Image (cartoon, rainbow, N blue to C red):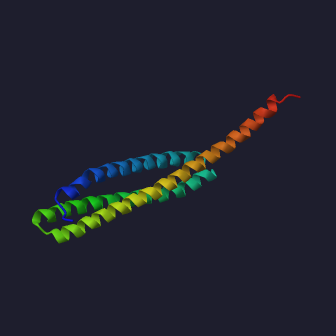
Amino acid sequence: MELQLSTPALLFSAITLLMLAFTNRFLAIANLIRSLHKNYMDAPEQEIIVEQIANLRKRLSLIKNMQLFGVFSFLLCVICMFLLFQGVTVAANWVFVASMASLLVALALSLIEIQISTKALNVELKDMEEVFKNRSSTIDTFFKKK
């Protein structure tokens, strides 16, 4: 298969959209961390906050690496197009393969980050369920027929 100039150019839009999604995740994490910091300053003894801090550190690191590999993939696409323009097709093929591999790593990291964020939401839900269970049992005893 011969690599044409338009092939790596097709990845531009995909990589750009992924980078936008990664940046949105980063901004969401930044807001969560700021909110968590405020909650921690109000009540530092809450155990759930400690769990969330560890979770957010992992997610922040993953998002940073997702962005790094996404940018690297984008850069390699540009280099690939330059090499194709110069007529160095063998090198362009290898650079394109490296670009695709970098994109694959970014997507794999994204999948891992989604799994971790789901676990974080489950921690929050578990905490709310415990409060709800305690509250409903109190209400049940109040309205119980004698």
Instruction: Report the residue at 59% width, 47% height from top.
Output: 124
Residue at 52% in and 56% down: 55
The N terminus lies in which quarter of the figure? bottom left
Residue 82 visible in rendering: yes
Q: Residue furthest right?
A: 146
Tell me: 110 left or right of 17: right
Q: Could you say where residue 78 lies in the image, as x and y percent from the top left?
A: 20, 60
**Image quarter of residue 70:** bottom left
Residue extending farthest left: 86
Q: At which x and y percent is residue 139?
A: 76, 32
Where residue 28 sits: x, y (%)?
43, 46
Give 89 or 137, whichever is nearer the viewer.
89
Which residue does the image show at 22% across and 68% down from the upper left? 93
Residue 31, above or below 99? above
Q: Is residue 86 above or below residue 135?
A: below
Evaluate whether residue 44 shows in this view: no
